[in-house]
C-alpha cells in the first residue's frame, strides 16, 4: 500500500473514531455501521481521483458530489432522478428533514430515537462533511495537523450534548484517531527521504524495534493524553477540565464559588403548552390564603442580545441557611412570609428548582447551589428535581400603585445592565413603546400602559401554534402579526420596557396551578409560563402579566382604563389552535421507550436547545476553539520543535548519504563518456572532477555537521551543556567523561567527532555511514543513567529548544540587514541624477 493510500485509510479511521463520541446521543447505535460504509466510499473516491491524478480542487469537488449522491440515495431516493441524482424536490426534502431534525433535537432527550429521519440526516450528513474536511486537509493537501480542527468540532458537539459519564472514553478514542493520522503523515513524509529507520532489536537476534515515527508518535501520544487527563484532575483550581461532563460543571464540590449558565428553555415551554394530556408536574401545599399570585419561578432570562433572551452566566455559591432580602426591596413595602411544600413528579427531572419569588429559605436534600442575583437554586453535578419534596419560605410582597409610581431612579449599575438594547433591535420596537406610553408620567405608568396594550387594547391574540421565532426581527414580526403565546408577550414587553429606560428581564416557570379537593394545588404541563419582571427601586423586581388569557393580573397594576375586563382569578392555560403537537417535549432523563409510550413531557427543561438557536456566533466558537488549542499546544511547543528537528537532522543524514553515493556513481558513468536515459544511450562529455569533488564535500559536510549538532543537543537535553570553544575531539571526550558513558557508546561519540574533523580539515572528506545510529545509541545511554525527572524534562522541556529562539533572532537580524541594504540601494538610485553614472 502506498503512503498516500495509507494516509487516506488513517483519515477514514480518525473520522470514524471521532464520530464514536456521538454514540450516546442516539439509540440504537447501528448508524455507525452505515457511516463507516459511506465514509469508505467517500475515501475510495478520493483515492481514485488522486491516483488519476486530478487537480486538488477537482478531487474535492468529486468527493463532495459523491457525498451528496450518497445522502440522496439514503434519504431522498424517492424524490431524486433514478434514485441517486438530486433535483429541486430532493433539496426541498432535505430542507424539510433538517427542519424536522431541529425540532426533534429540541423535543427529545438523550438518547434520541434513531427512527427520526431528521436526526439521522443531521448525524450521518454531519459526519460525512467532517470526513470530507479531514480527507481534504490531511490527504489531498497533505496537512494532517489542521485536520484536527474538524475532528475537535465533531467531538466538541458530542461532548456538549451528552450527559457525561463515558466522555473520557470517547476523548481517548478520538485522540487516538488523530494521533494515528499524524503518525501516518509523518511516516509518509519521512519515507520521501528514503528508507525509514528502524530501531534496534529488543533482544539479541530479535526483530527490529519500532520505526522512528512510531516511537515518536507513541511518546507524543503518552505525553499529550497524560496532560489532558491528569492535569485537570490534579489542579484543584480548575473545575472539571476538558473531560468535565457537559451538565455537571456547575461547581466544584460543596464549597462556594463556581459559575452556572443555562440555555434557552422556550421551545420546550411551547411544547409543554401543546401537549394533549395536561400531566401533573408539581403538587404543592401552602399556608397562604390566596394562591392567585403563587407563581413558581424557575429562572430569569436577563441577557438580551437582540435576537432572544437567555440566562446570563452567574456566580454560584453554597446554599445559605437564610436568604438575604431581595435586591431593592425597601422596609415600607407590605409583605408576609408564607411556607410552601412542593413535591415534584418522579418523571420531572429539572436542573433548576421551581420556587415562589422571592424565596427567603429552602429546605431540600441533595446537591444544590445558590445563584444570588436571580435568587435561584441549581442542581450540582447532575442533581435534579426528580421525585424531590422540599419546603420553601417566600415573601408575598404587596406594593401599592403609589409606591411604584413614586419609586426613585434605580442604581446606575443595575440600570446599565438591565436596560441594554442592542443596535440590531428594529426601530419599530422603541417607536411602538413610545407611542403606547405617550402621556405617562413615570416608569410605573409606562409599564402599566405596556401591559394593557398587550393584554387589552392592542388587539393581540393568544396562540401556542406560533413558532418562538429567532433573529432581530422576531419581536417586530410579533408586533405586526399580533399573535403568539407567553414567550412573545413577555419578550416584547421586556424589550420595549428597556427601550424606555426601565430595567427589565423575563422569568420562566409556572403560573398558579389548580386547587384540589384535598387542599393541595396541582401544577401541570400547561401551566408552564413566561412573564416580564420590571425593577422599581424600593420594591425590587416586580411581576407584570401582559399575556391575555393566562395567569393573574397583579393588583398593583390594575389599570383605570374603561372596559378593563381582566378578572382577578387564575386563568388555566389554553391553546388557540385546533391541533396540538403530537410529540410532547421529553424530560431531561426520559428514556427512548418512555418517549415511544408517550410518557415524557418537557415542563421547561433547561438543557434543550432550539433549532437555529442563540448560542454564541460561529466566529466566537471558532475563536475560542483556536484559543483553547493554542493554550494546550503552547506547553508542548518545545517538545514538538525538538522532535521535529531531530527527525529532520537524522533523516537528512540518511538522504544525503544516499545522494552522495548516487552522485559518485553518476560521476563514474559520466567519466566513461556515457549517460543513459529511459530508452536511449547517448554520449556526454566527462563531468568535471573538481566540481564533483566540491559537490561531494558540501553534501558530506552538511549531513555530518547536522548529525554532530544533534549529538551535542542530545547531550545538552540530558544536562551536558555544550562548549563551542572546544575542538570536536575534546568536546566528544568531555561528553564521554560527564556522561559516564560505556566504551561502546564512547566509541560512537568519537566516531561522529572524527567525521566532523574530517569534513573540516580533509581535502576530500569521505562519507561515513551509520552516524545517525551512533546518535541514537548515545541518547539511549544517557537516558539509562539519569533519573525519571531528567528523562521527562529532556522530552517535554528540552534545553536545546532554546535554539528555536536563537534561530528566530538570527533570521530577524538577517531580515533587518537585507531590508536596510535594499533601502540603501533605493535611496542611492533616487539620489542619482537621471542619465548620470556613478563614479
Image (cartoon, rainbow, N blue to C red):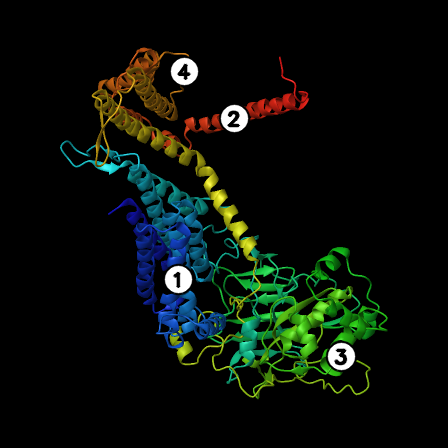
Mark 4 or mark 2, whichever is nearer to me: 2
Q: Are marks 2 and 3 in contact (CB under 8 Å)?
A: no
Give the image quarter of residue 645.
top left
- Label 3 and label 1: CA atoms lie apart by 57 Å
Give whichever of discs 3 and 1 has the lower sequence position.
Answer: 1
Quadrant of image for the C terminus = top right
Give whichever of discs 1 and 4 has the lower sequence position.
Answer: 1
Circle 4: element type: loop
- Label 1 and label 4: CA atoms lie apart by 61 Å
Mark 1 highlights which residue? 65
The x and y percentages for residue 480 are: 69, 77
Mark 2 highlights which residue? 809
In the depicted structure, whether residue 219 falls above or below residue 619: above
Q: Are marks 1 and 2 in contact (CB under 8 Å)?
A: no
Which residue is at a point 55% across and 72% down the rendered structure image?
267
Mark sitting on residue 723? 4
- Label 4 and label 2: CA atoms lie apart by 21 Å
- Determine whether, in the image, residue 159 is placed left or right of residue 476: left
Amino acid at each position: 500500500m502506498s503512503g498516500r493510500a495509507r494516509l487516506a485509510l488513517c483519515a477514514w479511521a480518525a473520522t470514524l473514531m471521532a464520530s464514536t463520541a456521538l454514540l450516546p446521543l442516539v439509540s440504537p447505535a447501528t448508524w455507525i455501521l452505515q457511516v463507516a460504509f459511506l465514509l469508505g466510499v467517500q475515501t475510495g473516491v478520493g483515492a481514485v481521483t488522486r491516483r488519476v491524478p486530478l487537480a486538488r480542487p477537482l478531487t474535492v469537488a468529486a468527493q463532495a458530489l459523491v457525498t451528496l449522491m450518497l445522502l440522496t440515495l439514503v434519504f431522498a431516493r424517492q424524490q431524486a432522478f433514478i434514485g441517486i441524482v438530486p433535483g429541486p424536490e430532493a433539496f426541498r426534502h432535505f430542507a424539510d428533514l433538517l427542519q424536522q431534525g431541529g425540532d426533534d433535537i429540541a423535543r427529545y432527550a438523550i438518547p434520541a430515537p434513531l427512527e427520526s429521519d431528521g436526526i439521522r440526516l443531521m448525524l450521518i450528513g454531519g459526519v460525512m462533511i467532517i470526513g470530507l474536511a479531514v480527507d481534504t486537509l490531511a490527504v489531498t493537501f497533505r496537512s494532517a495537523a489542521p485536520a484536527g480542527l474538524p475532528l475537535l468540532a465533531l467531538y466538541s458537539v458530542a461532548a456538549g450534548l451528552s450527559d457525561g459519564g463515558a466522555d473520557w472514553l470517547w476523548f481517548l478514542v478520538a485522540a487516538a484517531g488523530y494521533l494515528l493520522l499524524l503518525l501516518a503523515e509523518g511516516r509518509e513524509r519521512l519515507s520521501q527521504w528514503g528508507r525509514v529507520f528502524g530501531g534496534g532489536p529488543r533482544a539479541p537476534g530479535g526483530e527490529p524495534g519500532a520505526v522512528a515515527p512510531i516511537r515518536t508518535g507513541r511518546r507524543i501520544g503518552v505525553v499529550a493524553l497524560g496532560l489532558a487527563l491528569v492535569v485537570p484532575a490534579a489542579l484543584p483550581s480548575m473545575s472539571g477540565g476538558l473531560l468535565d461532563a457537559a451538565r455537571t460543571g456547575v461547581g466544584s464540590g460543596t464549597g462556594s464559588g463556581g459559575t452556572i449558565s443555562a440555555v434557552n428553555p422556550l421551545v420546550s415551554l411551547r411544547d409543554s403548552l401543546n401537549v394533549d394530556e395536561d400531566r401533573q408536574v408539581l403538587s404543592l401545599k401552602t399556608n397562604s390564603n390566596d394562591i392567585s399570585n403563587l407563581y413558581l419561578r424557575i429562572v430569569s432570562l436577563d441577557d438580551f442580545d437582540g435576537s432572544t433572551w437567555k440566562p446570563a452566566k452567574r456566580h454560584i455559591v453554597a446554599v445559605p441557611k437564610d436568604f438575604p432580602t431581595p435586591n431593592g426591596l425597601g422596609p415600607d413595602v407590605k409583605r408576609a412570609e408564607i411556607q410552601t411544600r412542593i413535591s415534584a413528579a418522579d418523571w420531572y427531572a429539572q436542573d433548576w428548582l421551581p420556587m415562589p419569588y422571592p424565596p427567603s429559605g429552602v429546605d431540600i436534600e441533595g446537591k444544590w447551589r445558590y445563584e444570588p442575583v436571580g435568587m435561584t437554586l441549581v442542581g450540582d453535578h447532575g442533581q435534579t428535581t426528580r421525585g424531590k419534596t422540599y419546603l420553601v419560605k417566600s415573601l408575598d410582597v404587596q406594593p401599592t400603585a403609589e409606591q411604584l409610581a413614586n419609586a426613585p431612579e434605580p442604581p446606575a449599575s443595575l440600570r446599565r445592565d438591565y436596560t441594554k438594547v442592542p443596535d440590531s433591535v428594529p426601530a419599530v420596537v422603541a417607536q411602538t413603546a413610545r407611542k403606547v406610553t405617550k402621556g405617562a408620567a413615570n416608569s410605573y405608568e409606562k409599564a402599566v400602559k405596556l401591559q394593557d396594550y398587550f393584554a387589552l387594547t392592542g388587539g393581540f391574540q393568544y396562540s401556542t401554534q406560533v413558532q418562538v421565532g429567532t433573529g432581530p426581527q422576531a419581536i417586530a414580526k410579533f408586533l405586526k402579526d399580533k399573535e403568539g403565546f407567553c414567550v412573545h408577550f413577555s419578550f416584547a414587553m421586556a424589550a420595549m420596557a428597556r427601550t424606555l429606560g426601565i430595567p427589565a428581564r423575563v422569568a420562566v416557570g409556572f403560573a398558579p396551578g389548580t386547587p384540589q379537593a384535598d387542599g393541595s394545588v396541582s401544577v401541570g404541563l400547561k401551566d408552564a409560563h413566561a412573564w416580564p419582571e420590571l425593577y422599581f427601586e424600593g420594591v425590587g423586581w416586580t411581576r407584570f402579566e401582559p399575556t391575555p388569557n393566562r395567569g393573574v393580573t397583579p393588583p398593583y397594576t390594575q389599570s383605570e382604563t374603561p372596559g378593563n375586563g381582566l378578572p382577578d382569578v387564575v386563568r388555566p392555560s389554553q391553546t388557540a389552535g385546533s391541533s396540538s403537537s403530537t410529540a410532547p417535549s421529553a424530560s431531561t432523563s426520559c428514556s427512548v421507550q418512555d418517549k415511544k409510550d408517550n410518557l415524557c413531557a418537557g415542563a421547561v427543561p433547561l438543557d434543550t436547545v432550539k433549532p437555529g438557536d442563540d448560542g454564541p456566533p460561529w466566529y466566537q466558537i471558532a475563536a475560542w476553539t483556536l484559543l483553547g488549542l493554542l493554550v494546550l499546544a503552547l506547553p508542548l511547543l518545545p517538545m514538538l520543535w525538538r522532535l521535529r528537528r531531530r527527525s529532520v537532522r537524522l533523516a537528512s543524514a540518511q538522504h544525503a548519504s544516499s545522494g552522495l553515493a548516487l552522485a559518485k556513481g553518476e560521476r563514474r558513468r559520466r567519466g566513461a563518456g556515457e549517460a543513459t536515459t529511459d530508452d536511449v544511450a547517448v554520449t556526454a562529455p566527462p563531468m568535471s572532477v573538481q566540481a564533483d569533488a566540491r559537490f561531494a564535500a558540501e553534501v558530506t559536510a552538511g549531513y555530518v555537521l547536522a548529525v554532530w549538532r544533534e549529538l551535542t543537543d542530545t547531550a545538552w537535553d540530558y544536562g551536558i551543556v555544550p562548549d563551542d570553544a572546544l575542538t570536536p575531539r575534546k568536546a566528544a571526550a568531555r561528553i564521554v567523561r560527564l556522561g559516564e558513558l560505556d566504551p561502546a557508546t564512547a566509541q560512537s561519540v568519537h566516531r561522529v567527532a572524527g567525521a566532523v574533523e574530517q569534513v573540516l580539515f580533509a581535502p576530500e572528506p569521505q562519507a561515513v555511514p551509520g552516524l545517525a545510529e551512533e546518535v541514537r545509541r548515545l541518547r539511549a545511554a544517557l537516558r539509562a543513567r539519569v533519573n525519571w525527572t531528567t528523562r521527562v524534562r529532556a522530552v517535554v522541556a528540552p534545553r536545546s529548544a532554546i535554539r528555536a529562539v536563537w534561530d528566530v533572532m538570527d533570521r530577524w537580524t538577517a531580515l533587518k540587514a537585507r531590508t536596510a541594504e535594499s533601502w540603501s540601494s533605493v535611496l542611492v538610485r533616487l539620489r542619482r541624477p537621471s542619465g548620470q553614472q556613478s563614479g
